[in-house]
Amino acid sequence: MLRHVISPVRSFTKASNELVRHRHLNSDAKVLLLYIQGLPASECDKPLGEHAAELGLLPREYQRAKKGLAASGLLHEWKTQGRRGRWSTDQLLSNVTLTREEAAAVRNGVPVEEPETDGPSGANPTVGPPTSPALGRSNPKDEDWGKTPSHPPTEEPAAEASAVEEPATEEPAAEVPTAEAPAPEVATAERLLLSLRHQSRDLLLGVREARGLAEAAAEWLRRGVSVAELRHALTSHLPVDGVRSAVGFLRHRLTVKLPERPPEPAVAAPAGGGIVICEGPGREHTFRQVADETRCGPCRRERARTRTEPVGGPVSWRDHFDKVAQGLIT
């Protein structure tokens, strides 16, 4: 067999040999995966079924391809129910096999790191190191975007400097007050903002920039918005000509699109009406009125008993029926 290959210089999509030679994926699944991999970030908010329809896949062919991608760990789905009861489905399509935990980490904006090795393994000989990291397994420390790193340092720079410098005198150094731990919503929002660069390079934020927007993003989470819904609101329908300022663009969306607060749960009114004075005989007493009655329960039962019981005490049931038949009582 002869082979003639010319590598394209632009408008191409890289695919690993492992993916091309995958035995458990049919051609429709491979073409669909490569098609999604080559899409720009602005067109990734549509469901996978719509992209399959654009490729001309029939529903049965799409379901067969989708089943193969899910079985191979390349497609993961999450179904969530919103605060209004509506269900939504989040889909993650990867060109490398991911476990359920790794896929959830990528969905929440936490990069999945590969274990570092000294060189290529001997089991699968390779020509050299990969030219670019695979999707879902990028190592943030190997990237250089010209700005501050995406992961915030564990300690404040001032605290680190004070720990390194030695005191000039023999007096004991003053203890540095530790900063209070941020709220869980603020920490989650900060991690989400730092991970937006994986969705679009135009949304790259520095550590201080993300911290400045974390409180505004945390307000969305306090109002019942999920992490996936917030990510979609910040990354969908980006400007065609690009984002000039990531900080200004995200601050504008966080402020303008802020949803309203969920309604407060209504406090159930206590059962029954108010406290009224009973009109029955005896000492003055009160009871809780249920409808429009004017006597309490014991007084109503006593009144009913005196109305039905004849004068002179109780009678036998035979005499009672005889008097009813004669029309003496009703």
Image: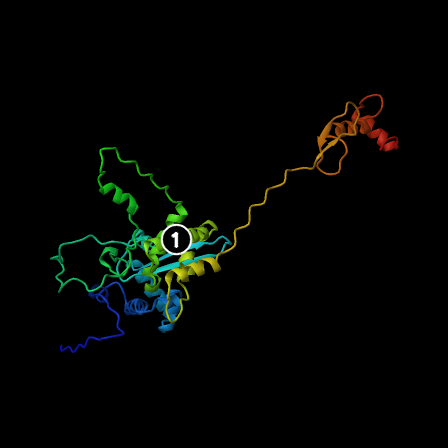
Q: Quadrant of residue 229?
A: bottom left
- The amino acid beneath tag 1 is Gly
Q: Is residue 119 visible?
A: yes
Say which of 80 and 186 sits in front: 186
> What is the residue that sits farthest to the top in this orientation?
312
- Residue 38 percent coordinates (x, y): 30, 69
**Left-right relation of 291 to 151:** right
**Image quarter hosting the N terminus:** bottom left
Q: Quadrant of residue 11?
A: bottom left
**Left-right relation of 318 to 213:** right
What residue would you read off at disc 1?
Answer: 212
Q: Quadrant of residue 274?
A: top right
**Considering only vertical position in the picture, is 207 above or below 3?**
above
**Considering only vertical position in the picture, is 34 above or below 111?**
below
Give the residue at x 59% y 42%. 267
**Considering only vertical position in the picture, is 118 above or below 298?**
below
